[in-house]
Amino acid sequence: MSELEQLRQEAEQLRNQIRDARKACNDSSLSQITAGLDSVGRIQMRTRRTLRGHLAKIYAMQWATDSRLLVSASQDGKLIIWDSYSTNKIHAIPLRSSWVMTCAYAPSGSYAACGGLDNICSIYSLKTREGNVRVTRELSGHTGYLSCCRFLDDSQIVTSSGDTTCALWDIETGQQTTTFTGHTGDVMSLSLSPDSRTFVSGACDASSKLWDIRDGMCRQSFTGHVSDINAVIFFPNGNAFTTGSDDATCRLFDLRADQELMMYSHDNINCGITSVAFSKSGRLLLAGYDDFNCNVWDTLKGERAGVLAGHDNRVSCLGISSDGMALATGSWDSFLRIWN
Amino acid sequence: MYDKGAARGVYIHWSSCFAEFWLVLECTMAKNNSLHPNSNGETDDSPNMLVYRKMEDVIARMQDEKNGIPIRTVKSFLSKIPSVFSGSDIVQWLLKNLCIEDQVEALHLGTLMAAHGYFFPISDHVLTLKDDGTFYRFQTPYFWPSNCWEPENTDYAVYLCKRTMQNKARLELADYEAESLARLQRAFARKWEFIFMQAEAQAKVDKKRDKIERKILDSQERAFWDVHRPVPGCVNTTEVDIKKSSRMKNPQKTRKSVYGLQNDIRSHSPTHTPAPEAKQPTEEELQEQIKFWQAQLDRHRLKMSKVAESLLSYTEQYSDYDPFLCTPDPSNPWISDDTTFWEMEASKEPGQTRVRRWGFGINEVLKDPVGREQFLKFLESEFSSENLRFWLAVQELKKRPIREVPTRVQEIWEEFLASGAPSAINVDSKSYDKTTQNIKDPGRYAFQDAQEHIYKLMKSDSYSRFIRSSAYQELLQAKKKKSKNLF
């Protein structure tokens, strides 16, 4: 047997052993344990605000930590900072490249970031002395489109890219401090853990990976989906995360059990998921779909608890404010809606 | 100039479209080919294929002879309307055969399938499902989106042009189509003669067809263009997320030419075509994989029941703090237009619910700026605040710009760890030695070990004292203070 063949067999054997080890932990399932749990009942949310102003598809949004401001990015080549409560636009920032795919708000509220087909993560200072908004850094280094970016703090940002890698950048120097390699497909999304020590990424290779921010190592890898993973989000306690995929399912993975706990799907849901978010307690999972709707799932029981219909085109992004009060959805119909 | 012979030789392959239709039907009823990632982890098909396959499975059931939607020919004023069924028929079938709760959901799912062109209203360009007597027809599999159609504007021009040549009221151009035709005529002015000739050839072949068959094919062709060139204002379901568009340009699979010369009939449904051979990993890659999997095998895994319990208790504990489950006190500003809740959060005087949360664990105190402040105040009253101050300083260090890090590391060392430090903290010798090494080459994580040790100390000692303290208990019992002054 050739060396290659031997190695292949060894790898296959290890994977089987891991699969067995995971199975050995299945003394029960999440749905069995929550069978007797009271259901959350029918969740009905109404649109409380509609943010109008973008002229083309909205691709991304993120709440600021104050739970009122939010940033959105659109193919009309603009980044808009909104006061979502009053619906006023605080800033309308023209972008150098209109092919923007992601945007982020720094926890301090002083910076925003965005990027896309230009392969660059541009950092904008929102609180300059002159009062205007300008680019303070252009982080280049990725050899593929920028699919997602998230600020750790004002000095560091994590990005994911179509070049199959993720990176941690030092904004001041513009350098990549750490590169996270391992995915074999475009990385579409990332989510920072609540303690900011790790993050999870989802990619077009149908796998999601947990990375240690400090040493760049992949700590765990999860499979289960059968198509591109478009979105990932950590469960509020940092011990689990959910992914949304083009295979029309969302799945909950647990870090300590090292496997999938629950799948959220329905025979009538025949389209991909673009975005996912948890309510403050984690009991509700909200997911945005290609069929213009948002579905609300009972995280623990796996049942659909509600549908949010209102957009006239695909829901491309969504997020829940840090105080858990409001859900914001962004769509290809160029509008953002605030629901609760 | 242009070879008339070639134009006349344009092959229309839809005459066999019905034969293909039945072939596809058989295939979709057969067991599905799973779309699993190969050993490299790549899924070679376009991400939409899975979705198309799901829809096509439903379509196949809808077309089933026994349990599907009854298709009939309706006698109208002077002619027959072949091969139709009503919108209500579709809604009823969906409600009966899929687990759909209500008419709204059935309409939503049906409209999605119509928008992709799997069935269409025979008298409307707008592809939605209506729960009434509107007539619908199935699309021929030749035109299904799973064939990866990307029809070009030249084809659209041929199509619109040939429509003007046929003297039928039902084929008259709508306003937006007439506008498109005018635009295309300007854009393709140079090759218009060629386009015209193709259109003529198409029209000629169409005329030769059986009248009934023609009605059906004309409507299917129109529905195809309604998907790829939708009515202005309608959603274009063929629009692809730009992140995916580069991956979807698979030249072997994309079909661009509707009226072209190629004869590329598929013998079976593209969603059930087996994926091509995948790239095999190299020796080096396998070594890496083995190392990783070995480490994974050695990891300690928790039992499912334990993990589930932990998730359950977390959600239960925090459900009072989830505005989607529990109405916030005094109200949700988004609903009541009263921002009192936010004003209270911003104030230095924490409410009872907020104080109660600090009791859930040390992280809740450390996360909340007011909690940190109260914790610090308490420790200072005991003259034991150095641990918390050290922890806070190290957290702040991690967020500093890299050029400020070395100085700050030195400052923290001097304050808390150096011999004779004014706020000396007690760390175990291992962490102390490691830290002494780290500060020689100071980075953001220089105090990581020491910080973890101090965190554990605080958790087991200072934090529990804080929660038991009278200061905390008073805050917990405190009556809700009025947020607005009366005078």
Image: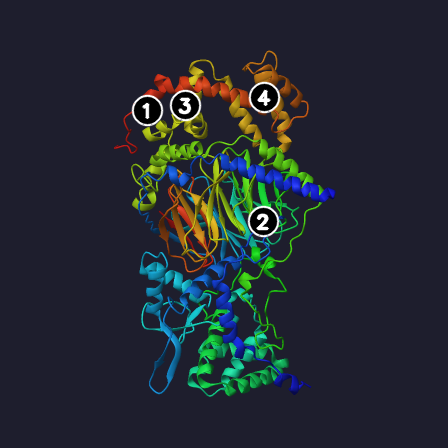
Does A340 sit left or right of B151 as displayed? Answer: left
Chain for disc number 1: B
How far is disc 1 from disc 3 in space, using C-alphas? 12 Å
Chain for disc number 2: A
**Do dots 1 and 3 share one subunit?**
yes
Q: Amino acid at mark 2?
A: Asp
How far is disc 1 from disc 2 in space, using C-alphas? 50 Å
**Do dots 4 and 2 share one subunit?**
no
Q: Name the residue that disc number 2 marks.
A: A205
**Do dots 3 and 4 share one subunit?**
yes
- Number of the front mark, 3 or 2: 2
Q: Which mark is residue A26?
A: none
Q: Amino acid at mark 4?
A: Ile
Q: Nearer the viewer, residue A210 or B252?
A: B252
Query: Quick check: marks 4 and 2 in contact, CB under 8 Å?
Result: no
Q: Secondary structure at mark 4?
A: helix
Q: In terms of sequence position, does the residue under pointer 1 or pointer 3 come before the other?
A: 3
Q: Name the residue that disc number 3 marks.
A: B374
Q: Name the residue that disc number 4 marks.
A: B412
Work out which quarter of the rendered image holds the N terminus of chain B and state it: bottom right
Chain for disc number 4: B
**Do dots 3 and 2 share one subunit?**
no
- Specify the quadrant of the image occupied by residue A157: top right
Q: Name the residue that disc number 1 marks.
A: B476
